[in-house]
């Protein structure tokens, strides 16, 4: 056990608010604990001499307990927790609602609760929690109607109702758990604490969870990266849509971050994200019991052509591949199968296959060195004994030690066979696509365990210059910087075209004459960010026309927005867009994960095509390089259709330098370099805009 052993392996539990009153939470918790808990249960109720025949004490300080479960009105709950802390109780579970989820008064009460827990170093679950369970000690300190079966999965959820539903279903399916935690409002202990605890727990093989939000995304990534080197984590994260995020916020007081941030953060953390409860357990069950595949190549052995094609389609939609058999394997299949069978993948043993033929085919498939895993896919026939097929599958999986997913399709006749498979740790799925998803999760986790996390590169930069530029936003109503922010990029070593911001026509002419060739001129105003929409950009301006262009740009800006602040005009070296690829590198600061980096196809198409990928900063060189490969337009960077390859290394370095900039300066809320033009000769940031938080500056 880890640091939270007092919570999960207590010898004595106090129930504050214990009662025999029908329909009460205090009664339900007492009954659940008395049902199987191996230790002592102490009821705390000053108005009762005893509860369920057990002598009650007046206060939690008299209970001499390891854990206190608090079921009292919110107005006195904080005082009870303080008393528990004074008595040296290390673990407290606050069932009581009426805290941060209820408004300002509740939020104030929750802040007091946190203060007390920190003062006494209490490991506190909740408030607004269903409770916790730990099957090794028979502890069910919840007010749910079901106890958990024993198992090696540990499960956390921000929704107590979700736990009750899952346990009801899991008990029917024979799925067990080691620990179960209803996180509630996560006032003190949150998802990172339990991930860390279960990562250190030899009795937890898989960590699963339902989350509506993550309190500290950076801490979660750091914690989960370490844990997932050995222990898989599978999570359902709700609130993917704007409506879902709003519902999550009203449910538990969570400030839901963007789903792009969660998608990127969970991937960087090594977490497998499930999109549904079905996917959550399809992945968890196979990860709990099956070995990791050496390759992503799957063999399908079936007695039904149609489902075999379905599994082939599902494999094609996944990261897995259909295995190509060796010549020896094909010869073995030819001997084992009738002429009408199919010896190629998917292997069709034909509908009249008996158990011996089916067994021989599965044995041959598992024995092929090209095969990483096998799906045993069958439909019921009069000549096939499902129970025997299950027993054969178990024996062959143990013989070859390769992952196997079963897909025994059918109803009642499947149940005894599914139980045989389940007892041996082989999951059975009705839908072939679910079997593929399970094996895909094994493959993904194998890659996660093989990751080598690099430290981000630290570049030599001019931080003082950035501080000076950011301070220039002082007093602006919108706290924005447009092209005048080019100096930030220059200070962090990101290439920019030659040029200056000027505030007179004559100065514009002087700057233009110092630049080879024609120039680009842009109006500079924090109030006009989409300059091209108002004609605020002129391209290919000759020296002789610069002064007139200056006057025209200022005039257009004044006509468009008379009260706009006009800083001046940027006179800039022209960048050859025809020989390069316009990309965008940007950042938006997520409330949970912090700086969320974006890379994608840029220019005027960024909002139309939305060809982008995301990472949470800071990023390493390999993570930045991966971003350049993940967009649909990646071939353009690498020389598609006869074009010369762009300077991808320059793009990768720019992503890293921007990552360092936004990590160093939390006051930068948003930043877009658009376009960052990548040519065969290098990269240049043509335009930039950013928003600054004046309170952070």
Image (cartoon, helix red, strand yellow):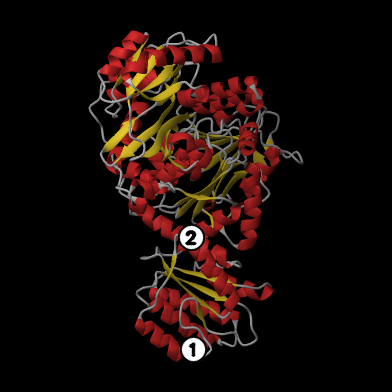
Which of the 4 image quarters holds residue 221?
top left
Nearest the eye: 504 or 530: 504
- Disc number lying in front (2 or 1): 2
Q: Give the CA distance from mark 2 to mark 1.
A: 29 Å
Q: Is residue 246 above or below residue 165?
A: above
Q: How crowded is mark 1: few (under 14 residues within 10 Å), some or many (20 or more)?
A: many
Nearest the eye: 346 or 365: 346
Q: Position of residue 358 (x, y in %)?
A: 51, 83
Residue in view at x 50 percent, y 31 percent: 188
The quadrant of the image that shows the C terminus is top left
Residue 637 makes an appearance in the image: yes
Residue 318, label in figure? 2
Assign a secondary structure to mark 2.
Answer: loop
Q: Where is residue 540 in the image (x, y as percent from the top left)?
A: 37, 26
Q: Where is residue 77 in the image (x, y as percent from the top left)?
A: 61, 26
Residue in view at x 30 percent, y 20 percent: 499
For mark 1, what is the residue?
337
Nearest the eye: 585 or 64: 585
Residue sticking out furthest to the front = 544
């Amino acid at each position: 056990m880890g640091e939270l052993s007092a919570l999960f392996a207590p010898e004595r539990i106090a129930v504050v608010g214990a009662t025999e009153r029908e329909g009460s939470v205090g009664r339900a918790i007492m009954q659940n604990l008395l049902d199987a808990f191996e230790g002592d249960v102490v009821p705390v109720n000053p108005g009762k001499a005893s509860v369920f025949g057990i002598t009650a004490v007046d206060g939690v300080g008299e209970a001499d307990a390891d854990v206190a479960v608090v079921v009292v009105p919110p107005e006195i709950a904080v005082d009870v927790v303080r008393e528990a802390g004074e008595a040296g109780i290390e673990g407290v579970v606050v069932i009581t609602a009426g805290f941060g989820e209820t408004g300002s008064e509740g939020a104030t009460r929750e802040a007091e609760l946190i203060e007390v827990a920190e003062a006494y170093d209490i490991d506190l679950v909740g408030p607004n929690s269903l409770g916790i369970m730990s099957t090794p000690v028979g502890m069910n300190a919840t007010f749910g109607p079901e106890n958990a079966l024993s198992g090696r999965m540990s499960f956390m959820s921000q929704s107590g109702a979700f736990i009750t539903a899952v346990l009801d279903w899991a008990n029917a399916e024979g799925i067990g758990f080691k620990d179960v935690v209803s996180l509630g409002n996560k006032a003190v202990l949150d998802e990172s604490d339990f991930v860390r605890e279960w990562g250190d727990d030899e009795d937890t093989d898989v960590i699963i969870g339902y989350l509506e939000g993550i309190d500290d995304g950076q801490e979660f990534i750091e914690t989960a990266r370490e844990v997932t080197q050995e222990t898989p984590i599978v999570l359902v994260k709700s609130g993917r849509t704007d409506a879902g995020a709003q519902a999550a916020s009203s449910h538990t007081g969570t400030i839901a971050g963007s789903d792009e941030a969660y998608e990127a953060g969970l991937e960087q953390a090594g977490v497998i994200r499930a999109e549904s409860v079905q996917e959550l357990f399809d992945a968890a069950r196979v990860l709990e019991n099956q070995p990791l595949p050496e390759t992503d190549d799957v063999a399908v052995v079936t007695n039904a052509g149609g489902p075999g094609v379905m599994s082939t389609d599902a494999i094609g939609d996944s990261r897995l591949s259909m295995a190509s058999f060796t010549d020896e394997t094909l010869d073995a299949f030819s001997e084992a199968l009738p002429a009408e069978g199919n010896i190629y993948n998917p292997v069709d043993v034909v509908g009249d296959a008996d158990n011996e033929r089916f067994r021989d085919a599965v044995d041959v498939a598992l024995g092929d060195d090209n095969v990483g895993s096998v799906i045993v896919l069958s439909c019921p026939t009069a000549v096939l004994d499902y129970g025997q097929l299950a027993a054969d599958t178990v024996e062959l999986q143990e013989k070859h030690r390769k992952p196997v997913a079963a897909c025994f399709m059918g109803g009642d006749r499947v149940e005894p066979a599914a139980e045989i498979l389940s007892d041996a740790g082989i999951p059975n799925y009705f839908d072939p696509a679910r079997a593929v998803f399970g094996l895909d999760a094994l493959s993904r986790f194998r890659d996660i365990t093989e990751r080598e996390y690099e430290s981000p590169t630290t570049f030599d930069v001019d931080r003082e210059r950035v501080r000076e530029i950011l301070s220039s936003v002082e007093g602006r109503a919108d706290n924005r910087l447009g092209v005048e922010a080019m100096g930030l990029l220059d200070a962090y070593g990101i290439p920019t075209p030659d040029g200056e911001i000027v505030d007179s026509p004559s100065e514009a002419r002087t700057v233009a004459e110092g630049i080879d060739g024609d120039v680009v001129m842009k109006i500079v105003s924090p109030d006009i960010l989409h300059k091209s929409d108002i004609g605020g950009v002129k391209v290919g301006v000759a020296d002789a026309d610069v002064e007139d262009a200056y006057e025209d740009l200022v005039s257009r800006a004044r006509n468009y927005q008379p009260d706009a602040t006009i800083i001046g005009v940027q006179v800039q070296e022209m960048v050859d867009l025809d020989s390069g690829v316009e990309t965008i590198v940007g950042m938006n600061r997520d409330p949970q994960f912090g700086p969320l980096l974006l890379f994608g196809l840029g220019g005027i198409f960024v909002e139309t095509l939305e060809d982008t990928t995301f990472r949470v900063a800071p990023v390493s060189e390999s993570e930045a390089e991966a971003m350049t490969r993940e967009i649909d337009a990646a071939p353009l960077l690498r020389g598609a259709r006869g074009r010369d390859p762009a300077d991808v290394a320059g793009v990768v370095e720019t992503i890293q330098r921007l990552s360092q900039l936004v990590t160093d300066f939390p006051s930068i809320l948003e930043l877009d370099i658009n376009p960052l033009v990548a040519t065969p000769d290098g990269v240049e940031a043509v335009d930039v805009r950013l928003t600054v938080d004046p309170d952070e500056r």
